[in-house]
Amino acid sequence: MLDQAQLAEQRGDWFKVVQKRNNAINAVLARATPTPEPRPDDPTNDLEKLGDIHTPSKRAHNYLRHYWRYFRDVRYSARKVVEVGVQTPRSINMWEEFFPNATIYGLDIDPRCAEFAGGRKKVFIGDQTSEAFMMDFIAASGGDFDVVIDDGLHTTHSMFRTFSFLYPALHSRGIYVIEDIQEKPYVLAFLHSLLEAVNFMPPGAMNDWPKLTSFPQGTPWLVRNTVGVAFHRYIAFIERGHNPRDNPFLVEPEAYDARLAAYRAQVVAAAEELQRAGTPVNNETLLAKLGFGLRNHITRYLENRS
Ligand SMILES: C[S@@+](CC[C@H](N)C(=O)[O-])C[C@H]1O[C@@H](n2cnc3c(N)ncnc32)[C@H](O)[C@@H]1O
């Protein structure tokens, strides 16, 4: 079975590779005591509990467990939550209860939804694909949304248009959600390109990524402002953030270059010492002297020397 997996790997057929390995590993394990099914729920998951009370339509898609994971960290800090697609009071009531400090903005084309406003809920009636309506909404609400959920028309066109209006209007660390992305190949392809944007690394930055505190001029806004794209069944979560600056461990270029120079000086000194002792200067001897931590600097030194 493992031979077949290796053959599939050579062909790049990764689904087959995993399936074949899975079969082989299952045969090896042949577990006598399987883990319990289903596994216990997260006891702190308040959103599922609110879902049981309010029963929004998204609950039936089993989206609430994913929402819980992404929203629990911003639950108390969120001030503005937008849901495109209201239909009934159920979902916006649930969000009102879940986000105790937020105004909940519901957007829907159906005028009957206006009556669900009240408390911290505001409802705007209009077409999510209409630029005029969406711009008016952003102006009236002041934008800067912590969370946007697109659960409206669910067409490729409406998903793209709504994203183009509301993603730039998110808070700089806001979360954008698109429900029902199944059978939307163009939306999936776009999100995949965003995933590449999250992982963007300018040419030549590979070895010196710690000093990559900003991207070169001309890097698209989406690349610089997206730090996460996650897919779950039929739903995608896109996180805004400052890419790459959100990593607090990045080092300013001057400080990084000074650190690099210090490491290089250490390698040079070790090489000279080896030479004086008549020991060959190579990767092995330098590693033995300086340790694995300096391996990249040793490689650089040896490359530049030869
Ligand atoms: C799936 S329902 C929303 C369900 C709700 N979010 C929930 O979880 O219970 C979709 C809603 O989108 C609204 N809708 C459809 N086309 C729209 C459009 N072009 N602009 C705004 N809302 C639209 C429909 O009127 C409907 O109420």
Image (cartoon, grey):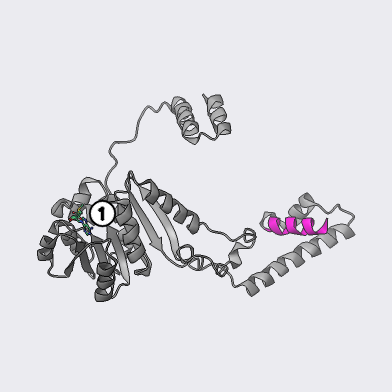
Mark 1 is on which residue type? Answer: Asn
Q: Quadrant of residue 47?
A: bottom left
Q: Quadrant of residue 162?
A: bottom left
x and y percentages locating residue 190 in the rendered image = 42, 53
x and y percentages locating residue 194 in the rendered image = 45, 56
Q: Is residue 98 left or right of residue 70?
A: left
- For label 1, the residue is 45
Q: Which residues are magenta?
A: 294-306
Q: Height in image: 80 above or below 207? A: below
Q: Is residue 202 among the parts visible in the rendering?
A: yes
- Whether the magenta-drawn stretch holds residue 227 is answered as no
- Whether the magenta-drawn stretch holds residue 298 is answered as yes
Is 23 in front, or is 120? 120
> Residue at horizontal 25%, vertical 64%?
82
Q: Is residue 100 left or right of residue 7?
A: left
x and y percentages locating residue 21 in the rendered image = 49, 30
Is 190 in front, or is 101? 190
Q: Is residue 69 among the parts visible in the rendering?
A: no
Q: Quadrant of residue 35?
A: top left
Q: Is residue 138 left or right of residue 120?
A: right
Identify the main secondary structure in magenta: helix
Q: How many marks?
A: 1
Is 217 in front, or is 66? 217
> Residue at horizontal 29%, vertical 66%?
131
